[in-house]
Amino acid sequence: MLTLTKFSKKSHLAPELIRAVVKQCGGWDEFKSIAHDVYNHGASGGFSGFIYYTDTVGFTSKYKKPIWNLCKEYSQDCDLSGFEFISKFRCLNLDIYAVAEAWFDKKSEDRTDVFNALAWFALESVAYSFVDELDS
């Protein structure tokens, strides 16, 4: 049986981000119950803790650093800048400049959309890593 501690140690993701996503979902049991659905359908399907902008924007604001580090890691694999990588998210229709502005400027009109997308990215990344670990 895969525990949160074992998963955190085995995953390539930052343990801080894993714990944050699990907590935002309502705990380990709740996360495990939704992980396959997130894996198969994406975070936009509406999962507890990741539905309302107040939750997703707050989550991204609180965990900006580990989310950014994950974006940088994935962006390097794609030979993109971090902001360019984020601008490619299907749920966003923004260029890299709008993404960068949203990241740095709390008054940006696109901040809510970008921070929501980043919270979903975190949820999906943790769910993908979890399901991959179960399958291995």
Image (cartoon, rainbow, N blue to C red):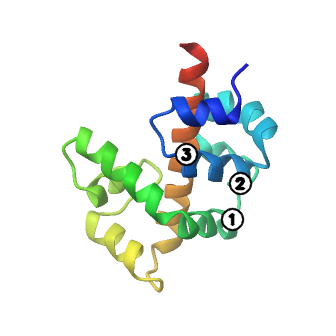
Tell whether 41 sits left or right of 115: right
Residue at numbered disc 3? 15
Going 32% across and 71% down the picture, which residue do you hit?
100
Percent x, y of residue 132? 53, 22
- Amino acid type, callout 1: Asp
Mark 2 nearby-residue class (10 Å; few <14, some 14–19, many ≥20): many
Residue at numbered disc 2? 24
Q: In 3D space, how far apart are the residues under numbered discs 1 and 2 (Cα atoms)?
A: 8 Å
Going 55% across and 45% down the picture, which residue do you hit?
15
Asked which secondary structure carries label 3, the reply is helix
Percent x, y of residue 120? 56, 50
Disc nearer the start of the sequence (2/3): 3
* Figure disc tally: 3
Q: In 3D space, how far apart are the residues under numbered discs 2 and 3 (Cα atoms)?
A: 14 Å
Outermost left residue: 79
Tell whether 102 sits left or right of 49: left
Split into 4 quadrants, where in the image is the N terminus? top right
Please determine whether, in this image, residue 87 is positioned above or below residue 27: below
Asked which secondary structure carries label 2, the reply is helix
Please determine whether, in this image, residue 66 is positioned above or below residue 115: above
Percent x, y of residue 105? 41, 82
Residue at numbered disc 1? 55
Going 27% across and 64% down the picture, which residue do you hit?
96
Q: Are marks 1 and 2 in contact (CB under 8 Å)?
A: yes
Disc nearer the start of the sequence (1/2): 2
Going 71% across and 29% down the picture, which residue do you hit?
3
